[in-house]
Amino acid sequence: MVLLKRTDGFSRPWPSAATVATMVFSFFCMSQSLRSLPMGTVYAVWTGIGAAGGLLWGIALEGEPAGVVRILCVGLILAGVAGLRLGGR
């Protein structure tokens, strides 16, 4: 969703097309994961990747602050996702 900011309300064609393409690809990957993993785990992984990826994108390319608390909180999200995966075995 990091490209969504660039679409300007879907009024800019190239960023809008890139956003839609990445959304379709993301849903495709999620649907493939659902073949072998429980829905709750897949959704947690999907949102965890989005949260961590959005934070890293914001810090690296958007000039957002990289505070210790922000990094720690995303680490907790990722630890929860890993716990869901490990606990489901």
Image: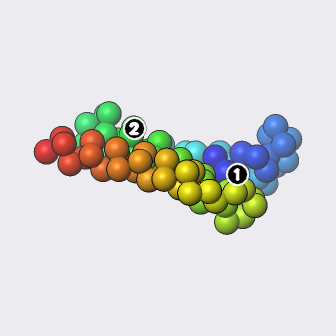
* Circles 2 and 1 in contact, beta carbons < 8 Å: no
Which is nearer the eye, 65 or 42?
65
Give x and y (percent) for residue 50.
52, 48
Q: Please report whichever mark, 2 or 1, sits nearer to the chain's N-terminal start.
A: 1
User: Measured along the vertical axis of the image, is residue 63 above or below residue 48?
Assistant: below
Query: Could you tell whether 42 is left or right of 70 in the image?
Result: left
Other-residue count near label 1 (Cα within 10 Å), few / some / many at <14 / 14–19 / ≥20: some
Q: Residue at x 49, y 47 (%)?
A: 73
* Label disc, if present, on residue 3 of the rendered structure: 1
Q: Residue at x 85, y 47 (%)?
A: 12
Q: Look at the numbered disc 2 and give the secondary structure of its residue.
A: helix
Specify the amino acid type for callout 1: Leu
The residue sitting at the bottom extreme is 60
* Label disc, if present, on residue 62 of the rendered structure: none
Q: Residue at x 18, y 41 (%)?
A: 88
Give x and y (percent) for residue 39.
31, 34
**Residue 8 in sight from this viewpoint:** yes
**Would you name the residue on which mark 2 appears?**
43
Which is nearer the eye, 70 or 84?
70
Give x and y (percent) for residue 64.
72, 56
Query: Could you tell whether 73 is left or right of 86 in the image?
Result: right
